[in-house]
Image: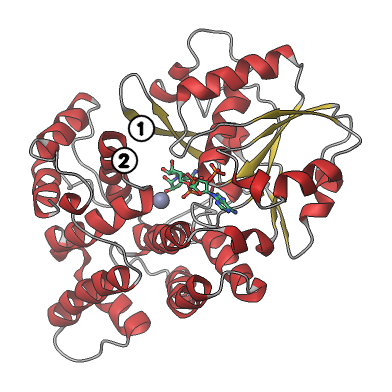
Amino acid sequence: MKNFELWNPTRLVFGENQLENVHKHIPAGVKNILLVFGGGSIKKNGVHETVTAALKDYNVVDFGGIEPNPRYETIMKAREVALKENVDFILAVGGGSVIDACKFLCVATPYTDGDPWDIITKRLGKVVTEAIPFGTVLTLPATGSEMNSGSVVTRESSKEKLAFGGPLCFPKFSVLDPRVVASLPERQIVNGITDAFTHVLEQYLTYPADAPLQDRFAEGILQTLVEIGPKVIHNPSDSTVAGNFMFCCTMALNGLIQQGVPTDWATHMIGHELTALFEIDHARTLAIIGPNLYRVMFNNKKEKLAQYGERVWGITEGSLEEKAQKTIERTVEFFHSMGIKTKISDYTEDYSEVAKTITSRFEERKWMGLGERGDVTLEKVEEIVEMSL
Ligand code: NZQ
Ligand code: ZN
């Protein structure tokens, strides 16, 4: 196991009827809250009304319209409102997109040294010293953004989708009330299962690292998602199942399982390009790229693939290589069983140049070797994307 330092200051507030208590977690002294949300689902399912009622003692200003894959341009409009209204707390009410938008908003609002986009491109997330504190009310279990300090923002003008983060981007609190799952369309539930599942694989499916507890944590989340995934798809109004689903998604990317072990993240880096170029749902890009990355990087990953196959899918027959191969196929079957398509051509017809476009973007950014060993080279990226067409 490698050395590590684990720090996560987010207060996680889990349970039914916790939406009504959101005011209890607002820090003392706060007066003006910017309530940030997406395209309006929270107005239809009653979450906006419940949260607004709980915040009756504050001056609450609404900012709606954050899009899936949040746009820098929209967040900059929210920044103007935050400055004008003298906002001293931001409440994100939504899924990963709204939460990620608020992470950027919280550091971009006080930033006056230049274009806030620099915070992302010049990697200033870790050095900025000022941020408006924020909390979240999660409405879509998937990304883990509610308990981590990472964010992914898209710039419409350049069609770039880039990640950033830093210690000031941890939410002060996140409210996880499983009742919110009831109104989710099946597409988003399936996305959530797939995203969380792949988050675990990014941190687990590397090489053996003498970290049996982290392995068991990871396998526990995978097994639980396999067990409850179909149930939550079938009956999202079952708060018990929904709550377990929520907790899986949070635990998959709140920093715990990655401690002391190598991590990959190349599937995400390539997947983000597919969303930026074709607006394919984030989770679906992972189901497209992940299995082909495991095939191309097979020699790096075969020990953990076989372990994952044995412990999560019960694949015990054959040599290590055979078990590892079967495990990749079983993973694809899992995605297909939830209705997820795993080819780029299932989502767009305009893909002839995609592998070259992605590798030239990576080259410009000097991303020459991704993955746990830094050997997912541009040639490998091209091969993975070509296999995914
Ligand atoms: O916008 P509204 O109307 O609210 O509708 C949303 C949106 O259309 C809807 N929705 C959310 N909660 C709902 C609901 N509909 C009905 N009932 C509810 N309770 O769902 C749609 C998708 O929402 P979005 O927030 O975009 O989805 P998700 O949570 O999957 O977030 C995806 C974004 O997070 C980034 C992705 O790249 C993508 O931009 N990620 C963030 C990460 C992080 N910060 O740690 C890690 C991830 O790997 C990921 O990259
Ligand atoms: Zn993800």
Q: Is residue 208 above or below residue 80?
A: below
What colour scheme was applied to this rendering of the protein? Answer: secondary structure
Name the one closer to the observer, 385 or 349.
Answer: 349
Image quadrant where one finds the N terminus: bottom left
Are circles 2 and 1 on residues that touch, CB within 8 Å? yes
Residue located at (63% from left, 68% from top):
243
Q: Secondary structure at mark 2?
A: helix
Residue located at (45% from left, 69% from top):
218
Specify whether tag 2 is near ligand 1 (CB below 8 Å). yes
Residue 215, horizontal then vertical, whole percent: 42, 71
Judged from this view, the residue extending furthest toward the right is 57
Residue 251, horizontal then vertical, whole percent: 55, 61
**Residue placed under numbered mark 1 in the picture:** 161
Disc 1 crowd rating (10 Å Cα; few below 14, some 14-19, many 20+) is many
Residue 225 vs residue 350: left or right?
Answer: right
Specify whether tag 1 is near ligand 1 (CB below 8 Å). yes
Name the one closer to the observer, 286 or 62.
Answer: 62
Residue 22 vs residue 276: left or right?
Answer: right
User: In this view of the protein, can residue 304 be seen by the observer?
Assistant: no
Which kind of residue does numbered mark 2 sit on?
Answer: Thr
**Residue placed under numbered mark 2 in the picture:** 275
